[in-house]
Image (cartoon, rainbow, N blue to C red):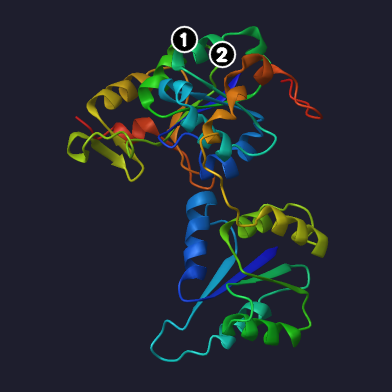
Amino acid sequence: MILSIRVDDRLIHGQVALVWTKEFNASRIVVANDEAATNQLMQATLQMATPTGIKLLIKSVSESISIFNDPRAQELKLFVLTNCIADALKIVKECENVNSVNVANVGRFDKVPNSEKTKLNSNVFVSKAELEALKTLVTMPLPVYHQVIPSNSKVTVEHLIKNLA
Amino acid sequence: MRKILLASHGRLASGLKNSIEILVGNDYPIVAIDAYLDENNHDYSEDILNFISSVNEEDECVIFTDLYGGSVNQKVVTICSQSKEKIYVITGMNLPILLGVLFHYEKLTKLAIEEIIVEAQVRLLEIDSNFSTTTNSVQDCSDFFSEIKGKEEKL
């Protein structure tokens, strides 16, 4: 079962390691990211960010989807990270066992110029493609919200995009 | 409640507090004293005293200072030695030690603090040609699905 998919352009970092793994009492983190799956340096830095005692798996998005549909994954509490909304959407479409999606930090490191992005709030900047993915994501039958750290209140993504044309 | 004071020459104290807020939120009672910044020669001893007087008997109190032997640390040590409250003073503060103390959910003891300090050391990272080749296990599904010792995980 996937406790939550967090969309975070930093993947595993301080906020995730320090507070989110505790919040979910998660002992297994999956990074679903095509670049990280083939980049050993990214793997080493992500491993560095992972708290002691927590298992980390780094796989491409498509491989991650087959792993989430593996019977062994149904009995475990998994915390999943993607670095973009489109990847989270792919997982939600192909896996039934996702509890929620947290669109937390988006668009700081995607190298798309700010002029081509829409600012939804100070942590979420979406390109055209990401915005389309987000609009589809909110139609899926699961909670989709924005919450950077647990002490911030949850804001629904529906609310974040309601004023957009 | 665990009450925390950070005291530094300049903005290290409020800077650390700001980093904590970004990383883990502002639910924690942290007071920061940035000494020697104001133009009115403010005597920050009062701020230290005010903090200590806010501590109740059931509170745990930790004061972090920036530099062993520095004047800020001297003021803290002098004031604490005259206080009847139990106060832990930790010097040479950094972000890991602060997080370690915030996230220590059991009662604070001298031993516990010493252990957190060991974990919070500055360290030299060896970023050599082997740096990225030691993490093969992050791709290994059977390792990932294997049981974690001592942890009950089934839903």
Residues packed near mark 2 inside 10 Å, few (<14), some (14 to 19) or many (20 plus): many
**Which quadrant would the N terminus of chain A be assigned to in this image?**
top right
Side (left or right) of B128 relative to B154: left
Q: Identify the residue at horizontal 78%, vertical 53% (top origin).
A: B106
- Image coords of residue B57 (percent x, y): 78, 73
Q: Mark 1–mark 2 contact, CB under 8 Å?
A: no
Q: Which residue is denoted by mark 2 in the rendering?
A: A68
Q: Is residue B26 above or below residue B87?
A: above
Tell me which numbered mark, 1 or 2, is placed earlier along the sequence. 2
Q: Mark 1 belongs to which amino acid?
A: Glu
Chain of the residue under label 2? A
Q: Identify the residue at horizontal 71%, vertical 82% (top origin).
A: B80
Q: Mark 2 belongs to which amino acid?
A: Phe
SS assignment at label 1: helix
Residues packed near mark 1 inside 10 Å, few (<14), some (14 to 19) or many (20 plus): some
Occupied quadrant, residue A18: top right
Residue sitting nearer the eye, B59 or A42: A42
Side (left or right) of A139 relative to A30: left
Determine which of the numbered discs, if any, sits on residue B68 in the image.
none
- Image coords of residue A124 (percent x, y): 34, 38
Q: Is residue A152 above or below residue A159?
A: below
Q: Identify the residue at horizontal 70%, vertical 63% (top origin).
A: B1
Determine which of the numbered discs, if any, sits on residue A94 in the image.
1
Residue sitting nearer the eye, B44 or A113: A113
Chain of the residue under label 1? A
Q: CA distance from mark 1 to mark 2?
A: 9 Å
